[in-house]
Image: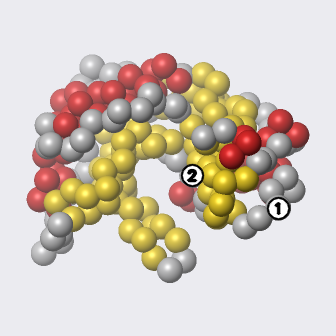
Amino acid sequence: MENALRVFWAIQPPKRVRDALVEAQGNLKALVDQPVKWVVPENLHLTLKFISSLRSDQIAKLIAQTESKLAASTAFDAALSGFGAFPNARQANVLWFGMSKGASLTAKLARKIDAAASKLDVASETQPFRAHVTLGRLSEPRSVRIDQAIPIKEQSFPVEEVVLFQSQLSSTGSVYTPLARISLGDPEAESVEFVPEM
């Protein structure tokens, strides 16, 4: 698709939480005997909706539709805790850190954002939403004894906004650029204006 962008809506934890997640990554490294592509600190986030291809001239409409769907949503307290793996620890290809508080409210945000994206003919999600922060991806499925990972303290933080990021692939990894922010609990808040590149 010409002028298409890879974008995703996400919750971005504050820096102090991302710093703790880097510690969590370190606790996992000793348990994995093959290369892992670890997510760099600035890219650690909780994905709400990923859109692999969207025309640049549709971004403004996506933001408007999402603002409308989230108009009544309010900020809430969340917490991250506990290691996990997809599809499971015996055949892990994704290592993640889970959500111990606010998961149901996060799932509700994801459903609303999914509904907003469907207005632009973006395919709706078919799998159940599982709130998590991806820590790393394995090159091949492998058994990982995540139950032996040294736990870190539960990380609490307020969820006050959702962020639309553009994802660009490079030789050194993914680069995420924020395109818009929508505040929760304030229907009058305006997101950052998006101006497509010519």
Q: Quadrant of the N terminus?
A: bottom left
> In the picture shown, does residue 197 fall above or below 162?
below
Pointer 2 residue: 44
Look at the picture and state if 140 lies above or below 20: below
* Residue positioned most to the bottom: 171
Q: Seen in the image, is 194 located left or right of residue 106?
A: left
Asked whether 181 or 39 is in front, the reply is 39
Residue at horizontal 69%, vertical 46%?
91
Query: Which numbered circle lies on residue 33?
Result: 1
Residue displayed at 52% across by 31% down: 130
Q: Is residue 15 left or right of residue 170?
A: right
User: From the viewer's perspective, is residue 3 above or below residue 74?
Assistant: below
Residue 144, percent from left and from top:
78, 47
- Residue 69, position in %: x, y? 22, 27
Instruction: Please give the name of the residue rendered at 25% of the width and 51% of the height, measured from the top-left corner.
Output: 192
Q: Is residue 3 left or right of residue 129?
A: left
Task: Tell me what residue is drawn at x 64 percent, y 64 percent.
Answer: 139
What element does badge 2 sit on?
A: loop
Report helix, strand or loop for mark 1.
loop
